[in-house]
Amino acid sequence: MTDPTVEAKTWSADERRRLPFGFVLAGLGFGVVLSVVVAVAIGTADIAPSDAWRIALNQLFGVGDPSWSGAQERIVWDIRLPRALLAVLVGSSLAVSGTALQAMVRNPMADPTILGGTSGAGVGAVLVLVLGIRIGGQSALSLAAFAGCLFGFGLSFLLARSNRRLSPLRLVLAGIAVSYLLSAVTNMVIFMSGNDNALNSVLFWMLGGLGRARWDNLLIPTVVLVVAGATLIGMARPINALLFGDETAASLGMPPDALRRRLLVIVAALTGVSVAIAGGVGFVGLVVPHAARILTGADNRRVLPLAAVIGALFLLWADVLARTLIAPGELPIGVITALVGAPVFAFLLRSSLQRKEAG
Amino acid sequence: MRLDVQGVTIPVSAVFACRDITFEVPAGGVLGIVGPNGSGKSTLLRSIYRVLAPSDGTVASDGRDIWDMDPRELARELAVVVQEPEAEFDFTVTEVVMMGRAPHKSAFGRNTAEDAVYIRDALDRVGMTGAERRTFATLSGGEKQRVLIARSLAQQARALVLDEPTNHLDLRYQLEILDLIRSLGVTAIMAVHDINLAARYCDAILLMADGEVCGVGPPEEVLTASLVADVFEVTVKTAQLPDGRVVLYFERPNSQGQAPRTIA
């Protein structure tokens, strides 16, 4: 049975042309390393890039003779390098979260912020801070943010659910409502706690910032990113199956409800831990997965690792801009990600509507 | 693969439930499920591919209750072709068919040369060779249906469940798809809207109404003018084609003798 139309059409228009995936991933991965090196050398303090790198090499491998001041060493080693690495961790975590969420709800406009996870995590973290719970440094904060994130996602899903079905539009609307609500709760808790620095706290939980990067804060995000990221890549085929629909996923031996529950916990861990240390950075999870898909198509076995790398790059450079644009002042990093992300969101919305009208 | 459905009852809701449905499909047999909208066809199919658990009764594949099987194990035996509302993610034809290999893969298992052979073979059997790199969304309805069937072939399942495989297809594609399904030699269970097509392409027919079986057996025994008239609440007339086959055609019960309304 050969369909003559199959031969007759020319495919060039709708065929996907791609660069070799390994090449792209390795190239961008190298780009991340390079960007960390460059980012460490950029800053307001008067430190020559060459000195910055020698300080880092000296600390890492004990090579080179110190010809720099103690202050310079502290700025590079204790502030800039952990900050660049945190950008990598948070960028990757949020990008991977967004990728998994978009597949989970079959909606290209989903991300941890839009579905209420980020603001939920903020509530959890702020409660821990206000109650003064100080156990194991970052761990109480991360745990509370994780729980809050689960709560935020859960609330959005419950609100959007009718008849056991999740309508994509309702989900986005419910998520936005939950987002505003939980942000308001966070802000209320902050102002009621009599925090002297309330406005700064509000800004941090709404727009994020990497200023809290310290070496001992990096452990939890690293472990969570490695474990959750690897788990998600291992689940890439089931995640693909969800994109085809629940019946299809079930018929391929992957019960969709159980799969979604697992994904939700993993995504909440990634998002919660990121928010606990970097605040409410938006739009990374929304925009980066699309960039990855443009480069490699829809298969999540490739999209997930690629999104991780692109997310790292995106947040690294967003942070460089955030700390240099109004130097010596610092913009919240969420301002930069929103400046890039919001237009992309608008574009996605438009093309998605056009597709619906055309289809 | 032989499929036994024994007394399956599904209380989804009072209206669309299935009640005490029993039939069997021998290995390689093609069963068509026919019935009006809301008669429980899709519900019954969903219980066969393990999405809905029956409150009573069993569904067995080669004698084994499918609920005693691991979902992935069943997925290696039984494939499903349903068109679901598409999400806006551009998978290529190859990637769609590759999903059929998923039940055979471990979490970090890579796609092998062997998988590539299955995929090439599957696309060849449905006549979609050459479309590997097209995105699924750009295919026509008939092409999509064929790619989904190719996925089930890559799945190497010995049984196929299809929900309205000819829905939204042009006449020619309807015939092509049904010819294709017949030519695969696998056990097939499909809900079919068109009664004459069902009669022509199926070995047996399960006629359903209000979640119950109204008849099961060879097409000529089940799809009789009187039974179809009863179940679908229409007037049925028969005509014999030159080749001897009998086809049914339908009118509204109270429109006998009236000239068909012209649509302009």
Image (cartoon, coloured by chain):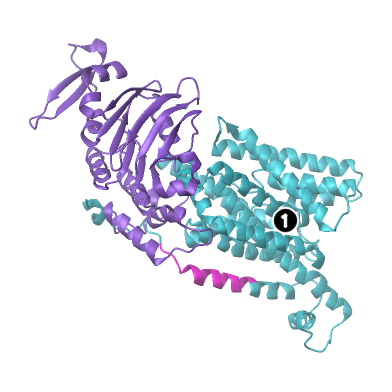
User: Regarding mark 1 in the picture, which secondary structure is present there?
Assistant: helix
- The residue positioned 41% from the left and 63% from the top of the image is A17
Q: Please, which chain is the residue tagged with disc 1 on?
A: A
- The residue positioned 39% from the left and 33% from the top of the image is B5
Which chain comes out purple in the rendered image? B
The residue closer to the viewer here, B115 or A266, is B115
Return the x and y of residue A320 as percentages of the image width and height.
71, 66
Q: Colour of chain A?
A: cyan
Amino acid type, callout 1: Ser
Q: Residues within 10 Å of mark 1 (few under 14, many from 20)?
A: many
Residue designated by label 1: A274
- The residue positioned 68% from the left and 54% from the top of the image is A270
In the drawing, does residue B231 fall left or right of residue A281? Answer: left
Return the x and y of residue B30 as percentages of the image width and height.
28, 38
The residue closer to the viewer here, A95 or A341, is A95
Q: Which range is magenta? A: A17-32
Name above or below for residue A263 compared with residue A217: above
Seen as rendered, the residue at the extreme left is B242
Q: Quadrant of residue B160?
A: top left
In the drawing, does residue B113 fall left or right of residue B184? Answer: right
